[in-house]
Each structure stands twice: as C-alpha cells, then as structure tokens.
C-alpha cells in the first residue's frame, strides 16, 4: 500500500520543466530520423530503387516507428498503471536514446547489403516502442500533480517538447547541411545528430532523477491487474474516438515537417537549408503559442479548441499546398504556419483532455494507447501516401484532399466526445438578512 503522505509535492515549474526536457529529448530522437529519411536515407539504404521508390522505402521505415508506438503504450502503460508513472519515464528514455545512437552506427547498403535496411527497421521499431511509453508517463505525471483549474496550462509543457525536439534535430541537420558538402553530409554528417542523442538522453535522465510519483496514482487503492484488458473491454469506443480525433494533428504535423521537406528539395528544387529554415520558423511560433492556447482550454474547455483546430485544418489544406507549390520561402512559411496553428489548437489541450477522459486506474494505458493509435492513423502513412499521390508533375492537390478528409474524420470524432474541463467552484456569498 502506498503512503500518500510520504510524498512531498514538487514545484509545478520544476516538474513541468523536467517533463518538457524529457519529451524534447525523446522527440528529438524520433524527428531526427524523419529528417534523415526525407534527406538522405533513401540513396544510402535503398540504392537499388529509383529516387522516388527510395524515398518511399525510407518513409516506410519511418512509419514503422508509428506502428510500434501503440505497442509501447501498451507495455509502458501497464507499468504506469501497475507500478507508477515515474518508472515509465526512465525506461522509455533509455530505450529510445539507445536505439537512436545505434541508428547512427548502422553501415550503409554498400557495406553490409540488405542487412542495413533490416537493422534500420528494427531500430526504428525500438524508437517507436520507447516513445509510445514516454508520452503517457510525462503527461500524466504533470497532469496529476497540477491544480484542476490550471491543468491545461501545466500539461501543455510536455506538449512543447515535440517542438523543441524538432528544432534541435533540424537545427543540427541545418548546421551540418550548411557547413558540409553533399558528399560529406552523405558519408558521415547525417550520423552526427544520432550520436548526439546519447548525450541528450543522459541529460534527460539527470533532470528526471528527482521527480516524485503522481499523487493520483498513489491514491488508487485497487490497481488494475491487466489495464489493457479493462481499457479494451470498458473503454474501446473512447480509445477509437480519441485516436480518430488526433489523426488530423499527426497528419498535418508530419506533412509539414517531413513530406513537405522532401517534396521541396526533390521536386521543387529548393535547397535543404531554405526548406529547413521555413519549417523550423513555423515550428518556433507553434511551440511558443502552445501554453497560451492551453490557457484558452482552461477557460473555455478542451473540446471547443479541438473542434476549432479540426475545422481550421479542413479549410486550410488546399491553400497550404498551393503556397508550398510556389517554392517561395515566405509563402511556404505562411502555409506551414497556419497549418501548425490548426495543429496546436488540438495538441495544446490534449494532454489535459485525454487523462480527464479515463479513470485513474487505467489512465496511463488508455490515454497513451488512444494518443499513439492516432499517430498510426495520421502520422505513419501520411508521408508515404503524400509522396505517392504527389508523384506527377502537377500541383499535388491529391495531398490536400487526403489531409482534408483526415481533418473531417477527426472533427466528427471530437464532436462525439464529451467536455471534461473541471467546473470552477462558485463562491457562496452570504448576505445580511
């Protein structure tokens, strides 16, 4: 039996900062692979394919990380609901960091043949497994410590982690791309960001070493024996609706940060440096606005923000593709920025929304499985589908149509979910009789 009184509540700022740092490190690991897949992995690991087929194959290994994320959420969700949120943060960070460093050490196809892409596939699977556990642990530890009236704000800090991780990954790639020749970048430069993941993982572990366990977990007297069984039996509809709702965020984010990067470089002839700069500038604004949007969620509710984000994405996808197709940096930036504003309307509040939808005894499993299944629906196949649809010479309107359909699907799913924002307590004013 856990003793709740023995655990001293941490500073919310320190807890939020540690959660943000950890998710930033893990998403750095995940994103650096996506950038490498867009820029260099195709020719190095699939040289017998045509350029288009090589890019598709590289994005195929990228998708494997999304497929393994729900498996990671099941594995680490079980640990989180049975043993606590804190152990999940350590184990997931170690697994993802080790797999990422190993990717940087895999020899190319010309050295070891078909074993090269196979190793890439296995390590990408392990990356996704670790990341599938990370989100649930980091978000729940923050959300369950936070005061109810500011749960959206404090829970949004782990959601800034993906933006920071993306900027770190692409900042290193941008620096290497700008300072190395194409031959040097292909020979060894692309490996440097993967090796750096080891240092970042150690830093993340140090930051998380002083975190205390979630008070909500300690208050649960009867822990679920097999949380996944309870989630599937009692909450399957909720899992499917949350996964469908989150699909649009993943689809939009990875279209902007992965597919558009490859399309701009390979098809439009825009330099790697320009494309990375446009995407990174939009992500900086998105990450900066995340806490402000979360505050709106605390005031007006989680569901209205999610509905607005889905509707905005549905309206903006065709204009975004049109702006991207110009190849003009400022216009591309505008297209990316508005798309990511639609994304952040959903993902800034989802870290508070999902935990509030599930009871504490199965919360780590239920929230994490729904979140990561959304990644499979919206993130795993989007770069592959978009690359295939955009194979012709014309403006890729098919990509816009695909994204609009995903946005409408998510809109319908959120429309079927309830609001969960805690109702503010009303003061009782006594009047003289």
Image: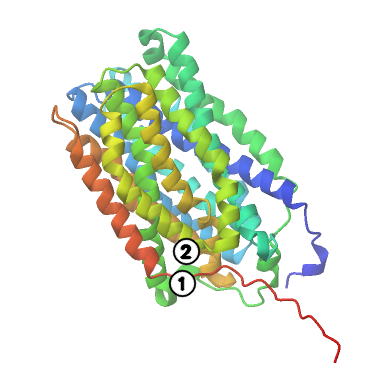
Tell me where residue 334 appears, x and y as whole percent. 39, 32
Q: Which residue extends farthest bottom?
A: 433
Q: Residue at x 31, y 50 (%)?
A: 314
Q: Which residue is mark 1?
A: 418
Q: Residues within 10 Å of mark 2 (few under 14, many from 20)?
A: many
- Examine the rendered structure and indicate whether residue 222 appears above or below residue 300: below
Give the quadrant of residue 64: top left
Q: Residues within 10 Å of mark 1 (few under 14, many from 20)?
A: few
| Viewer can see residue 102 | no
317 or 383, nearer to the observer = 317
Q: Position of residue 42 (x, y in %)?
A: 28, 25
Q: Is residue 393 left or right of residue 114?
A: left
Question: Residue 188's x, y, as percent?
Answer: 43, 15
Q: Which residue is mark 2?
A: 303
Residue 305 vertical placement versus 109 (above, below) = below
Determine the residue positioned at 47% across, 56% down: 73
In-image side of 189 versus 138 (left or right): left
In which quadrant of the rendered image does the C terminus lie?
bottom right
In the image: residue 421, left or right of residue 218: left
CB atoms at circles 2 and 1 under 8 Å apart? yes
Disc on the earlier residue, 2 or 1: 2
Q: Residue at x 35, y 64 (%)?
A: 413
Q: Is residue 204 above or below residue 304?
A: above
In the displayed structure, does residue 9 sit left or right of residue 82? right
209 or 107, which is in the foreground? 209
Q: Using the image, tell me which numbered label, if any, was put on residue 173.
A: none
Q: Which residue appears farthest toward the right when viewing the image?
A: 432
> Going by the picture, which residue comes out furthest to the front?
433
What residue appears at the point 26 percent right and 22 percent down from the top-left corner?
A: 266
């Amino acid at each position: 039996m856990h003793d709740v009184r023995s655990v001293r509540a941490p500073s919310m700022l320190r807890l939020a900062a540690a959660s943000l740092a950890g998710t930033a490190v893990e998403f750095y690991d995940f994103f650096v692979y996506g950038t490498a897949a867009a820029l260099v992995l195709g020719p190095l690991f699939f040289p017998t394919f045509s350029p288009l087929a090589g890019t598709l194959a590289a994005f195929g290994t990228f998708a494997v990380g999304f497929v393994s994320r729900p498996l990671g959420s099941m594995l680490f969700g079980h640990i989180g609901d049975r043993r606590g949120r804190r152990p999940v943060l350590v184990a997931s960070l170690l697994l993802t960091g080790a797999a990422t460093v190993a990717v940087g050490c895999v020899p190319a196809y010309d050295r070891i043949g078909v074993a090269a892409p196979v190793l890439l596939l296995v390590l990408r699977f392990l990356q996704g497994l670790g990341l599938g556990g990370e989100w649930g642990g980091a978000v729940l530890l923050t959300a369950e410590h936070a005061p109810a009236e500011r749960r959206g704000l404090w829970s949004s800090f782990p959601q800034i982690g993906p933006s920071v991780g993306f900027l770190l990954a692409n900042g290193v790639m941008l620096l290497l791309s700008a300072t190395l020749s194409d031959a040097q970048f292909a020979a060894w430069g692309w490996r440097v960001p993967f090796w750096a993941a080891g240092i970042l993982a150690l830093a993340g572990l140090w930051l998380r070493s002083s975190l205390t366990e979630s008070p909500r977990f300690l208050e649960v007297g009867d822990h679920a024996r097999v949380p996944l069984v309870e989630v599937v039996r009692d909450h399957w509809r909720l899992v499917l609706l949350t996964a469908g709702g989150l699909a649009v965020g993943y689809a939009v984010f990875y279209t902007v940060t992965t597919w558009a990067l490859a399309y701009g470089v390979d098809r439009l002839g825009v330099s790697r440096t320009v494309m990375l700069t446009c995407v990174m500038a939009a992500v900086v604004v998105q990450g900066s606005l995340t806490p402000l949007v979360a505050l709106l969620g605390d005031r007006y509710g989680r569901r209205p923000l999610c509905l607005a984000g889905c509707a905005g994405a549905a309206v903006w996808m065709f204009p975004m593709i049109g702006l991207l197709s110009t190849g003009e940096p400022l216009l591309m930036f505008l297209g990316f920025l508005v798309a990511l504003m639609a994304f952040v309307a959903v993902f800034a509040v989802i870290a508070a929304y999902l935990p509030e939808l599930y009871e504490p005894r199965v919360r780590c499993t239920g929230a994490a499985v729904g979140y990561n299944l959304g990644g499979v629906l919206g993130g795993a196949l989007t770069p592959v589908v978009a690359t295939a649809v955009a194979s012709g010479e014309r403006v890729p309107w098919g990509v816009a149509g695909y994204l609009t359909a995903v946005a409408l699907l998510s809109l319908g799913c959120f429309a079927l979910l309830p609001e969960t924002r805690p109702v503010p307590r009303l003061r009782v004013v006594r009047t003289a009789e």
